[in-house]
Image (tube, rainbow, N blue to C red):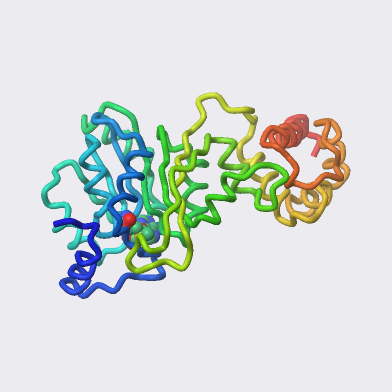
Amino acid sequence: MDLSLPGTVRAIREKYGLQPSKGLGQNFITDRSVLERIVEGAGIGGEDMVIEIGPGIGVLTVELAEKAAFVTAVEIDTRLLPVLEETLAEYDNIHVLNGDILKTDLGKIIEESRQEGRFTGKVHIVGNLPYYITTPIIMKLLEDQVPTDSITVMMQKEVADRISSGPGSRIYGAISVAVQYYCSVTKITDVPKEAFVPRPKVESTVLRLEPLKEKQIEVRDRKMFLRCVKAGFAQRRKTLLNSLASAAGIDKDTVRKTLEAAGIDPGRRAETLTVEEFGKIADGFTDGQDNGNR
Ligand code: SAM
């Protein structure tokens, strides 16, 4: 059965009485060339493990299982479990886990799979993401520091553009800084609405995020870093002095002194700052805390 044919999605819908859930972001890929570009972009080797986020009816899952030693696919919708049982029946290297990706301990799954000898190579996270939680998923993968070699995911084009943008750009934001702190970002491909059934309202893009072995700056306290980044962009029209003081709840005098010590003009706005500059500010606040100044 070719799962990428629009007719297959229709047949599965009829057989299982399954209405794709808008609330769960269910838009299934029906374009073989898109699948090929995702799998190629992920760079999966024969000894590797893949964690797939949201397998849906399994169209991408089977392509991943063809390349990898082992695939764990995390799907929240219990209605899809009997479908996946049928569509993935031929594969003995796929494990479907019913659960919420935001509540799944991926580090533990990876560790257990390695210990059980299911794979010996690298780890890749791949998925056509449920768009309603794109940012929380990416932030979770980064903040949990899931031990992965790559993250190749499809998302709304608008979010992908934001993640890829740099200082000075109108769309540069907290997610851009957070992702670029941890990862290099490569665009794999744009994907039109027509490549899905049902069609989403937005255009899509596949990005490959590769955790940096050597970061541009190693901050002393990652939580403080993210707090500064989120506070800085919370009201992007405000100066750093005001946005950090109001959104991060740090008194103005401390903010001014910390910014000046980091060599950053308190009158600048967050959207002009590089990842390194945010790192310097965060380290300044961390130093202040360590010295008991706040
Ligand atoms: N991989 C399939 C494809 O490309 O055709 C389906 C992708 S669809 C855009 C997103 C999938 O993620 C759906 O199957 C949906 O049920 C699942 N999903 C939604 N929220 C989820 C969550 N919190 N945890 C795990 N899976 C989720």
Asked whether the viewer can see residue 76, the reply is no
Residue 9 left/right relative to 270: left
Asked where in the image residue 220 lies, by quadrant, the reply is top right
Q: Report the residue at 42% width, 66% height from top.
A: 200
Question: x, y (%) of residue 151?
Answer: 42, 40
90 or 120, which lies in front?
A: 90
Question: x, y (%) of residue 259?
Answer: 82, 37
102 or 148, which lies in front?
A: 148
Q: Quadrant of ligand 1?
A: bottom left
Task: Quarter of the image for the C terminus: give it.
Answer: top right
Vertical order, 49 against 35 (above or below): above
Question: x, y (%) of residue 243?
Answer: 78, 52
Task: Quarter of the image for the N terminus: give it.
Answer: bottom left
Asked where in the image residue 208 lies, by quadrant, the reply is top left
198 or 173, which lies in front?
A: 198
Q: Report the residue at 86% width, 34% height from top.
A: 260
Q: Report the residue at 42% width, 54% height from top.
A: 191
